[in-house]
Amino acid sequence: MKKKILILCGGISKERLISLETGKQVANELKKNKYKVLTCEPDSTLLQKIKLFKPNIIFNALHGQFGEDGYIQAILETQKIPYTHSGVIASSIAMDKVISKKIFIKNNILTPKYIKLNHQKNKINVIQIIEKKLNFPVVIKPINEGSSVHVHICNKKNIVKKLNELSAYNEILIEEFIPGREIQVAVMENKNLGLIELKPKREFYDYQAKYNANAKTKHIIPVNLNKKDLKKVTDITCKAHRVIGCRGVTRSDFKFYKGKFYLLEINTQPGMTKLSLVPEIASYAGINFIKLIEWIIKDASINR
């Protein structure tokens, strides 16, 4: 008998639309394969819907804040129903770019140099503060957002303007800009699933490049790397997955420059839209969409 799957999607983050699309794609595929499916928002009715539907598994298709930062995972743990992707601690660590960078550095994983800027404390002499540790251009981004939301490449001329645009965030991550190739690697429970190279038409692989088909980002599989570099980047990815404490499927984002792989971040809940990378990587590895979803479901548990 097919399991009952409750799909959590939507939410209140800036990635709401992507989450809804992920939920829709997963739900359609499960329904085609005779699963009983309920799609649900993480709102005040959630616990009542769980009680009425009595799902065997909760598929977490949420993205961004309150969806992949440990909050919803903590709630799901109280329900004692197996759920997908990473647990409370790994989710909260991976979502916090500063904490995850500290863990990468402690475990000898190369990541771009960075500083944390507090909007209230560091308004004056921001260029001097940056130049003490970094060279321009730099990348600025919120510490707790995903999907390249509000990520900008900045020089001395526009850095103050761009930082002011992010004034709603109390703290901002500023890191050195690494040129080079954009390579993303997927892991299925500590085993390499595969990798893909991206060549965006835009300045970099930002939100539009990720989710707008008109952006015409070029996806390259297989990736042109020699065996040594291929092993190196997949080993780093598996190590990052392990030291953060991730579960299920993750995707790690790299820049490859002058023979070095710089880990930008690890994504604990990769998208499952028509333009998403993990389904594409899985497909190249011989795992179709339903098989990928079923693997994620089979991997679900509590106490993650």
Image (cartoon, rainbow, N blue to C red):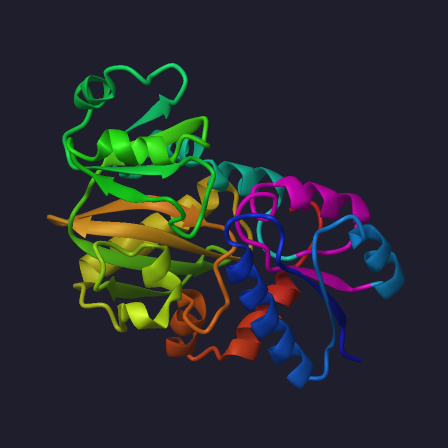
* Image: 88 above or below 126: below
Q: How many marks?
A: 0
**Magenta segment: does it hold 6?**
no
Quadrant (top left, top right, bottom left, bottom right) of the N terminus: bottom right
* Image: 87 above or below 40: above
In the rendered image, which quarter is residue 282 located in? Answer: bottom left
* Image: 58 above or below 245: below
Residue 104 seen in render = no
* Residue 62 relative to residue 280: left or right: right
Q: Residue at x 55, y 38 (%)?
A: 92
Task: Residue 40: give x, y in percent of width and height.
Answer: 72, 61
* Residue 50 relative to residue 96: left or right: right
Q: Which one is in front, 12 or 268?
A: 12
* Residue 43 relative to residue 156: left or right: right
User: Residues in magenta?
Assistant: 55-83
In the rendered image, which quarter is residue 181 located in? Answer: bottom left
**Magenta segment: does it hold 56?**
yes
Q: Residue at x 57, y 78 (%)?
A: 290
Q: Residue at x 28, y 51 (%)?
A: 254
Task: Residue 271: give x, y in percent of width and height.
Answer: 49, 62
Task: Residue 83: give x, y in percent of width and height.
Answer: 68, 56
* Image: 291 above or below 151: below
Residue 164 seen in render = yes
Q: Residue at x 24, y 54 (%)?
A: 204
Task: Residue 269: give x, y in percent of width and height.
Answer: 52, 55
